[in-house]
Amino acid sequence: MQLDPWGSCVVDGVPTLKCFEVVFGNILVMASAFIVLVLFIMFVMGSFRYLTSFGNAEKVKQAQGTLRYALLGFILFISTFLILKIIDILFLGGQNKIFQFNLEAP
């Protein structure tokens, strides 16, 4: 018996609407990874600019702005994750089904 990597979303070689769940889940994971990468780069760039400013007020201000926006992005990213986890616990019973879509016919 050969396992299908797509699960049950491909029936007789034809993708069904259930494949949308897989694609959307993959997009969310990739977007989260991209956001974390961008935030890391912003922190590194802001820190490097701050360390190499040598007391120049304008460069210090730019570096602080970069670090401030990186921190704001990090807080927003974590808060959205926590809000979704709270919604999952309160309304879905904490079964981690917040990103599992059911497109089954009635």
Image (cartoon, helix red, strand yellow):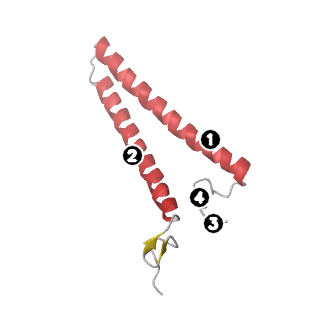
The residue shown at (67%, 58%) is: 95
Pick whichever, 92 or 43, lies toward us: 92
| Pointer 1 or 2: first along the chain | 2
Element on which disc 3 rests? loop
Residue at the outermost bottom position: 1
Inspect the image, locate mark 1, and give the three-letter code of the amino acid beneath it. Answer: Ile
Gap in angstroms between the C-alphas marked 4 and 3: 12 Å
Mark 3 is surrounded, within 10 Å at the Cα level, by few (under 14), some (14 to 19) or many (20 or more) other residues, namely: few
| Pointer 3 or 1: first along the chain | 1
What is the tally of numbered marks visible in this picture?
4
Label 4 or label 3, whichever lies nearer to me, is 3
Gap in angstroms between the C-alphas marked 2 and 3: 34 Å
Residue holding disc 4: 101
How far across and down, in percent of the image, does residue 58 sit? 30, 13
Residue holding disc 2: 34
Mark 4 is surrounded, within 10 Å at the Cα level, by few (under 14), some (14 to 19) or many (20 or more) other residues, namely: few
Label 3 or label 1, whichever lies nearer to me, is 3
Inspect the image, locate mark 4, and give the three-letter code of the amino acid beneath it. Answer: Phe
Residue holding disc 3: 105
Q: Quadrant of residue 46?
A: top left
What label sits on residue 83 in the rendered view?
A: 1
Residue 55 visible in the current orientation: no
Q: Quadrant of residue 14?
A: bottom left
Element on which disc 4 rests? loop
Is 88 positioned to the left or the right of 50 in the image? right
| Pointer 1 or 4: first along the chain | 1
Gap in angstroms between the C-alphas marked 1 and 4: 18 Å
Pick whichever, 90 or 10, lies toward us: 10
Q: Quadrant of residue 49?
A: top left
Inspect the image, locate mark 3, and give the three-letter code of the amino acid beneath it. Answer: Ala
